[in-house]
Amino acid sequence: MVKKTYTIEIDENDNILDFIEKPIKPFNNIMGTGNIIFKKSFLKYIDETPVNSIRGEKELVDFLKIILKEYGKVTTFKVGDSYINLNTKEDYYNLVRLFGIKVDIYRDSKYGVESI
């Protein structure tokens, strides 16, 4: 799962040293979930965050790296022991298999897409 999100490099005090977006070979099992608490003043760094040339979007990791560079200290906290990135049908079936949770899936006739 770490390959689908991002991971972090941390020191012995859980201070973040670096953010690594979608690592090809994850060196740990710490997965970024996007559950972030930061000061309102940090929003100004969104404008400084570059647009990813491949995806055409600003990446959360690039935004967080700017904050880390500017402030020098960013810490982490544990959200949970398991996580499912719920973006695809396969993700949904994993959710059902692991937790026994079922959510209705329907097809939108106007757009022809399935929703959970």
Image: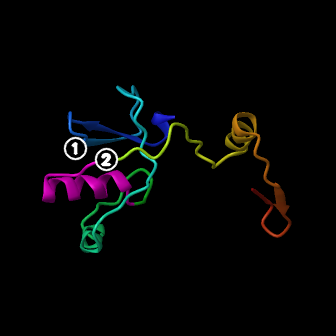
Q: Position of residue 2 (x, y in %)?
A: 46, 35
Residue 85 seen anywhere in this rendered image of the structure: yes
Residue count near mark 2 (Cα–Cα under 10 Å), binned few <14, some 14–19, many ≥20: some
Residue shown at 25% from the left, 37% from the top: 10
Kindly state the secondary structure of the residue where label 2 is placed: loop
Query: What predominant SS class does the magenta segment belong to?
Result: helix
> Which residue lies at the image location 25% right of the left edge and 69% below the top edge?
42
State whether residue 52 appears in this view: no
**Picture layout, residue 72 above or below residue 10:** below
| Vertical position of residue 28 compared to residue 50: above or below | above
Which residue range is magenta in the image?
A: 58-76
Q: What is the quadrant of residue 8 in the picture? A: top left
Find disc 1 in the rendering and name its residue. Answer: 15
Amino acid type, label 2: Thr
Q: In the image, 67: left or right of 100?
A: left
- Residue appearing at x 20%, y 33% in the figure: 12
Q: Is residue 78 left or right of residue 69?
A: right
Q: Amino acid at mark 1?
A: Asn
Q: Is residue 16 above or below residue 66?
A: above
Asked if the residue under mark 2 is in contact with the one under mark 1, i.e. CB atoms within 8 Å, the reply is yes
Q: Position of residue 25 (x, y in %)?
A: 39, 25
- Mark 2, residue position: 76
> What is the x, y in percent for residue 46?
30, 68
Q: Answer whether residue 69 is magenta in the image.
A: yes
What secondary structure is found at the residue carrying circle 1?
A: loop
Q: Where the C terminus falls, by quadrant?
A: bottom right
Name which of mark 1 and mark 2 comes first in the sequence.
1
Q: Residue at x 38, y 55 (%)?
A: 59
Separation of marks 1 and 2 at Cα, in angstroms: 7 Å
Badge 1 density bin: few <14, some 14–19, many ≥20, Cα 10 Å: some
Figure quadrant of residue 93: top right
